[in-house]
Amino acid sequence: MADQNWTDYHADLSLTRLLPRIQEIFSPSETEHQEMFERRLKHHWPRLFGLLVRLYGGHYDFFYHLEGIVAAAARSWLERSADLKELDARLEADPMWFQSQEMVGGVLYVDLFSENLAKLHEHIPYFKELGLTYLHLMPPFAVPAGDSDGGYAVNSYRALDPSLGTMEDLTLLADRLREEGISLVIDFVFNHTSDEHEWALKAQAGDSRYADFYYIFPDRTLPDQYERTLRDIFPEIRRGSFTWHEGMRKWVWTTFHSFQWDLNYANPDVFRAMTEEMLFLANTGVSVLRLDAVAFIWKRMGADCENLPEAHMIIQAFNAVARIAAPALLFKSEAIVHPDEVLRYIGSDECQLSYNPQLMALLWEGLATREVKLLEHAMRTRNRIPDNCAWVNYLRCHDDIGWTFDDNDARVVGIEPGAHRRFLNDFYTGNFPGSFARGIPFQYNAESGDQRVSGTLASLAGLEQALQANDPLLIDMAMRRINLLRSILLSVGGIPLIYLGEEWGALNDYSFITDARKARDTRWVHRPKIRWDKERWQDPETVERRLFSEVAALIRLRKAQPALRNAGMEVIRTENPHLFGYIRHGGGQRLLIINNFSDYPQSMGENRLRVYGLGYRFVDHVSGHSYSANEPLYLGPYGFVWLETTEYTRPA
Ligand code: GLC
Ligand code: GLC
């Protein structure tokens, strides 16, 4: 309490000292902007100040840094366009806009999807046909020639890869998408820059100010001590987390690739500099920043340097700055870590949105085992997030699948976690007898036995194998699996995110091994270049067109169900090990959704149906069929229903 009083007192004091300096930034003709800025600044200042004090209060020049951060926010606010300011006001008044059941996301690589940003405009009708309202472009920034980790080694946050277009093109696209009701999402790759970023180049040239932007060590003493507790992220590519730089003759902290230099957030100058980059991106019209690799942004000797408390404080401080200078901006957390740690990044004062890696991994787990006990248990206990936030659910993304579930959850349902992960890796890399999947291993770690899996949705779900066998029955099964996963993706609660290409069943593309920049990273197998084969595309009989039509129809269905708004979901006990069921309610509607993970028909007892469905008669919105609770509910192989009662149970 005393602490709180101290913070409040100093927050007031510092604001009183700051305001006159900030006011100098605004010219007399800009008083309206100034007033708006000050109103938000005053409102969010106590929170921002409290975080910055905890992070940087010990620095002798703390006030100087505070001023730098707030001045950056003020300048950015002045540069923010009238359109975006209007959007700020609109979304502040409707802060839950992203929870609408109308939200549907798509993600793509600009070069692989449409070559460049200009040509992306031509695909807007396609996005609308599919029903997208959220479009994530994989990092389009300037990157080193050669390997850039798929764009995640950024040379400049203010310049694009020239082959994709310019910043103006990006702004134009954001405007155009906004007119069409589509929010633009891009990455904020804020854990590291490339070794060719201006700051890194200055550090290499011996500029000590910029050397302090990174973690640079004269010898192995500290790196060796840190490494005792660190995990290798890309063990097949490089062991350890530090890279020797020949030019500087020093060691640099590089969690990911050797050309990705971790930023040193213990330095307030880095926080200020990255605040400026963040606000610059916000002013291009980006609605959501995907915060890349959130878990790694703070380091401490003796710790695994993942998910440290200060990592949360840094993100919360960015969040507070955004509320002041770009209120429409949302954050999406990319934390591919233990499910409980994933949850800690989610909050209206931190990341309003988050990937849901646990659900993703467990859907695949269910498909491999044909059983839902682990999925059910985890979704019952570890899926709950604050009401004003949303999951971003996905089946596949540009990254590998890691088997992130809680070990104890597995034990509780009678599964040995280590053996199970090995089974899942075998199953999805086609090394398990009878497996339908065609994935390939990613980053096998011989020491720990860890491995992840690469592959597209369709290849992992059996379509590649089925098409090769040219077997209509197998093709049918693979399509059913894909549709089952989509049923859950679109109804389970949160924003569904489609990794574009998956909507029509893109298969693995093995050609990456012939490209020297990609060959060592199997994730490229599921990042195919999209070929717009018009004929196949229009023929309604092709697998591609059928898969597309089915998902587009399911998306339309989703958008018409008020119960699918927001994240609240209640897992039910289907009493059938293969059926995953849950209730969604809201907007005066209640849906009972049941999904069959087995390749055989399954049933759920009629009293379950009555109890959970609160009724005697039901309509399935997917097929239009009616059901009665006088008999069990039968679902075909990989079948699913979205049931609404048409005749309520009369209260006793
Ligand atoms: C994120 C990205 C991944 C990248 C890593 C390093 O996890 O999703 O593709 O390799 O960050 O930036
Ligand atoms: C690790 C990281 C995650 C990253 C992935 C890339 O799992 O936790 O952030 O996306 O590696 O493969």
Image (spheres, helix red, strand yellow):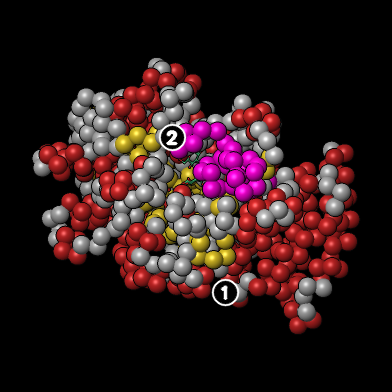
**The C terminus is located in which quarter?**
top left
SS of the residue at dot 1?
A: helix
In this rendered view, identify the residue nearer to me: 421 or 134.
Answer: 421
Question: Looking at the image, is mark 1 or mark 2 nearer the viewer?
Answer: 2
Residue 219 visible: yes
Q: Is residue 64 above or below residue 457?
A: below
Q: Which residue is mark 1?
A: 83
- Residue 312 position in % (x across, y down): 65, 42
With 25 as the anchor, is 243 left or right in this view?
Answer: left
Q: Position of residue 251 (x, y in %)?
A: 63, 40
Mark positioned earlier in the residue sequence (1 or 2): 1
Q: What range is drawn magenta here?
A: 235-264
What residue is shown at x 17% (from left), y 51% (from top)? 543
Looking at the rendered image, the quarter that the N terminus falls into is top right
Main SS, magenta residues: loop
In which image quadrant can residue 188 be found?
bottom right
Name the residue located 37 percent from the left edge and 51 percent from the top edge.
498
* Magenta stretch: includes residue 263: yes
Task: Tell me if 96 is positioned left or right of 135 in this view.
Answer: right
Q: Of helix, strand and loop, which one carries label 2?
A: loop
Label 2 crowd bin: few (<14), some (14–19), many (20+), radius 10 Å:
some
How many numbered discs? 2
What type is the residue that disc 1 sits on? Asp
Q: Position of residue 357 (x, y in %)?
A: 45, 39
Mark 1 vs mark 2, CA separation in Å: 47 Å
Rendered view: 381 above or below 293? above
Give the image quarter of residue 91.
bottom right
| Residue type of the residue flagged with mark 2 | Glu
* The one of 240 and 467 positioned closer to us in this rendering: 240
Task: Identify the residue position indicated by label 2 in the image.
Answer: 236
Q: Residue furthest bottom?
A: 29
